[in-house]
Amino acid sequence: MQLTAMPKPDKPLLEFPCVFPLKAIGKGGDDFGALVFEIVSRHVPGLTDTALTSRPSSSGNYLAVTVTFTAHSRDQLDAIYLELNAHERVVMTL
């Protein structure tokens, strides 16, 4: 079986700047939203708490936090995802 590389799209998937909803799912607790906000705000100057929404899982063990902001580059998004995924309380990012 021969593997072939996927063709590169002519156009990038995202065009910057763009409004970007980032979701982090992690172990529940009242401070998980603040933790996600703190990490994202290090990479997004001027981020306000109105950009954050959250929803607990049905069992209450996990919290899904969405932060919506204007992304300016792929490097910015990569840095945010790397830092979030490196945190022990973050289970998944979307």
Image: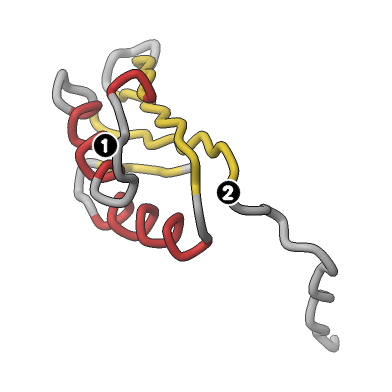
4 relative to 83 in the view: left or right: right
Image vertical order of residue 57 relative to residue 32, above or below = above
x%, y% of residue 77?
A: 45, 55
Image vertical order of residue 53 relative to residue 2, above or below = above
**Identity of the residue drawn at 30% across and 50% down:** 84
Of all residues, the one furthest to the bottom in this rendering is 2
The residue at which mark 1 appears reads as 36
x%, y% of residue 11?
A: 80, 63
x%, y% of residue 94?
A: 50, 42
> On the image, which quarter does residue 67 sit in?
top left
Mark 1: which secondary structure?
helix
User: Which class describes the residues within 10 Å of circle 1: few (<14), some (14-19), or many (20+)?
Assistant: many
30 relative to 73 in the view: left or right: left
For the N terminus, the image quarter is: bottom right
Of all residues, the one furthest to the top in this rendering is 58
**Identity of the residue drawn at 22% across and 51% down:** 87
**Identity of the residue drawn at 32% across and 23% down:** 63
The residue at which mark 2 appears reads as 17
Of the residues tagged 2 and 1, which is closer to the observer? Answer: 2
